[in-house]
Structure formats: C-alpha cells, structure tokens
Image (spheres, helix red, strand yellow):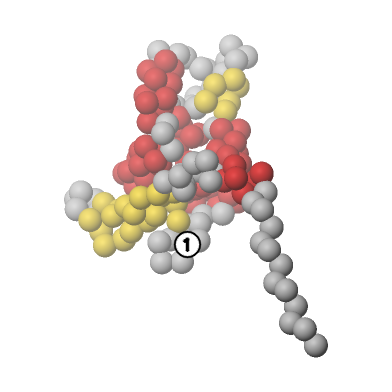
Amino acid sequence: MPAATPKAPAPPSLLDKLGTLYPPLRHEIVAVLGPDGTPSGLEVEVRELTAGARLAVTEAATALGADGETRLRVSLLYPHLVQRCCYDPATGNLLWKPSQIEAVNALPHQIMTQLGNIALRVNGLAKADEEETAGNAGEASGDGSSNSPSA
C-alpha cells in the first residue's frame, strides 16, 4: 500500500494576513504601588485592548451630558479601562469580569489611577485623555458626576 502524500499547507487566509499587519498587542507588567509609594510586591499585567474590548470600554464610558450631547467621561473611562486591561501575569486571566465593575470601582483611588494611567499609555490614549479632561474641566454637567478617575 503506497504512503499517502502529505497535503500542502493551506495558504494563509485574508484574516491570517490581516493579523500579521501589526505587531502583537502591547503589554506591560506593573509593580502595584503601596500607600507609601513603594512597590507592594504585587504585579499586574496591563494589556492593550482588542478592537472589541475598546468598543466596549468606549460604550461603557460614554454618557449623555446635560446639553444632550454624548461625551466620553473620564470618571467612567478609568474603571472600565482598568477592568478590560488588567490581567494576572501568573495565569494570563483577566482580574475582573465585566460584571465585576463594582469591585473595580472599590479599588483605592491610588491603584485605580496608577493602573488607569498605564492602561491609557499602553492603549495610546494618554494624550486623548488629557485633551478630553481639559475640554470637560469647565463644563457643568448638572448630573453630579466628576471627571476624576476616582469618582
């Protein structure tokens, strides 16, 4: 009985080719700072968002202002960004599921700010965040919310 001729590998699909156009998603291992500003011994991996996760964060962080316009709110952006970007470096698992956003909101503001600022940088949003914060700083939204990341 003759040996079967091995099949030639299939050529890469368009989807495979699209995935190679850009480098892998960026990530950074972060030493979480303690209350005194020194490393706490805990590490978190902050990863760049996928397209779907970025859309989910944008939708979750958008609110209707008193003037009827929708705006990206920093006070909503930070917790959703931290939730979607932070992973356990030992397991590779997300630290919080989307349904656990209240647990993220319960973080001390120093940790939220540290992780949020790094998540902004890893995702190329740091400059956009600064401009958004500056643009909203003088607004009175009338809804009692704040532009502070710890709100």
Q: Residue at x 23, y 56 (%)?
A: 39
Residue farthest to the front, as pictured? 2
Against 35, residue 144 (above or below) is above
Residue at 60% across, 45% down: 17
Which x, y percent locates residue 108?
Answer: 36, 47
The answer to which image quadrant residue 71 occupies is top right
For the C terminus, the quadrant is: top left
Residue 147 in the image, given as x and y percentages of width and height:
43, 26
Residue 44 visible in the current orientation: yes
Q: Amino acid at mark 1?
A: Gly
Query: Residue 18 lies in what quarter of the image?
Result: top right
Report x, y in % for residue 106: 44, 48
Is residue 133 shown above or below 84? Answer: above
Observer-nearest residue: 29 or 86?
Answer: 29
Q: Please tell me which residue lies in front, 109 or 129.
A: 129
Residue 118 vertical placement versus 136 (above, below): below
In the displayed structure, would residue 14 be above or below residue 68?
A: below
Residue at horizontal 67%, vertical 49%? 13
Residue 72 appears left or right of 33: right
- Number of marks drawn: 1
Q: Residue furthest right?
A: 1
Q: Nearer the viewer, residue 132 or 48?
A: 48
Taking depth in this image into account, of 108 and 7 the one nearest to the observer is: 7
Task: Name the outermost residue toward the bottom.
Answer: 1
**Quarter the N terminus occupies:** bottom right
Which residue is pictured at 37% across the width and 26% down the height?
Answer: 127
User: Does residue 82 appear in this view?
Assistant: no
Q: Is residue 28 left or right of residue 15?
A: left
Query: Crowdedness of circle 1 by 10 Å Cα count: few (<14), some, many (20+)?
Result: few
Q: Disc 1 marks which residue?
A: 92
Query: Judging from the image, what secondary structure is the residue with disc 1 in?
Result: loop
